[in-house]
Image (cartoon, rainbow, N blue to C red):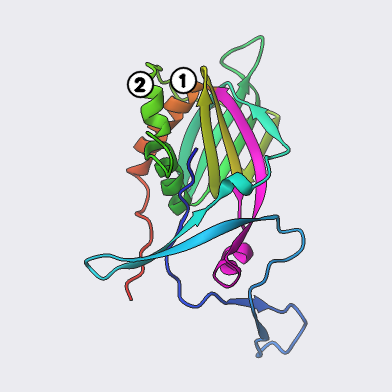
């Protein structure tokens, strides 16, 4: 299992909240608040902030998150097919269930929406070995001789279609089965990390699929990565 969320350094971790109280058209009412964990945001997990300055002076902050402390998602979805797309600055990973009477038609569709930066992290979580791992998920599947499945061509949206947002994931494979647990931490939660050393995270959904689908998804995401903007870096 692997989670490699990375947050570029953005300066002081503070937030500005715009108050919607009616005011004069020529005035701007902005209230500055300290980042705190709010009730209902999710479950806290332990983090470690690792600061790194590269040889060219570029500075980043990487958040090492212990996702084993996060609750298992209440929702699960068994996926037969997958595909990926990058449009309007957003990456969508589609998981679908095919119709019993027509394998080329979709009974339902679930999309995981993420930013390009989080898509880079998702790819790294599948292609790089994390702490305590002998090898990556991709290397394990290749070693087992798994043949990657091809992405599914979506001809039309089915009546049952839902889109969710995620920026963290855990993955596992065993005996031909694969599992992806998607989770999400809101910007409010991310802003409060430095002060609390905790990340409040919300479980989103568990995707259950066969190993060929997962390996095919890895390949599709790696191809898509070439079209994405590079991860943001901040020069001090």
Residue at (67%, 84%) from the top-left corner? 31
Residue 184 in the magenta stretch? The answer is yes
Q: Is residue 89 visible?
A: no
Residue 205 in the magenta stretch? The answer is yes
Residue 182 against residue 216 in the figure, above or below: below
Q: Which residues are magenta?
A: 183-209
Dot 1 corresponds to which residue?
212
Q: Which mark is residue 5?
A: none
Q: Is residue 221 visible?
A: yes
Circle 2 SS class: helix
Instruction: Provide residue 180's location: percent of width, then percent of height.
Output: 56, 34
Circle 1 SS class: helix
Residue at (49%, 30%) from the top-left corner? 83
Instruction: Provide residue 205's location: percent of width, then percent of height.
Output: 65, 38
Dot 2 corresponds to which residue?
143
Residue 217 against residue 5 in the figure, above or below: above
Quadrant housing the C terminus:
bottom left
Q: Nearer the viewer, residue 92 or 44?
A: 44
Instruction: Provide residue 121's location: percent of width, then percent of height.
Output: 44, 48
Instruction: Provide residue 56's location: percent of width, then percent of height.
Output: 22, 67
Residue at (50%, 61%) from the top-left corner? 48
């Amino acid at each position: 299992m692997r989670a490699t969320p990375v947050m570029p350094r953005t300066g002081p971790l503070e937030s500005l909240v715009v108050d919607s109280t009616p005011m004069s058209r020529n005035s701007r009412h902005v209230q500055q608040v300290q980042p705190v964990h709010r009730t209902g945001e999710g479950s806290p997990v332990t983090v470690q902030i690792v600061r790194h300055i590269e040889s060219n002076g570029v500075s980043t902050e990487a958040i090492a998150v212990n996702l084993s402390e996060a609750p298992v998602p209440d929702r699960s979805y068994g996926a037969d097919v997958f595909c990926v797309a990058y449009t309007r600055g957003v990456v969508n990973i589609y998981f679908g269930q095919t119709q019993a009477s027509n394998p080329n038609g979709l009974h339902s569709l679930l999309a995981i929406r993420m930013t390009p930066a989080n898509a880079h992290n998702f790819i790294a979580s599948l292609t790089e070995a994390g702490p305590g791992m002998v090898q990556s998920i991709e290397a394990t599947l290749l070693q087992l001789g798994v043949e990657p499945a091809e992405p599914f061509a979506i001809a039309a949206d089915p009546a049952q279609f839902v889109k969710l947002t995620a920026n963290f994931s855990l993955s596992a494979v065993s005996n031909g089965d694969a599992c992806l647990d998607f989770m999400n931490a809101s910007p409010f939660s991310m802003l409060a990390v430095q002060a609390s050393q905790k990340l409040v995270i919300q479980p989103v959904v568990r995707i259950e699929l066969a190993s060929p689908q997962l390996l095919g998804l890895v390949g599709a995401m790696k191809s898509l990565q070439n079209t994405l903007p590079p991860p943001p870096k901040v020069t001090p």
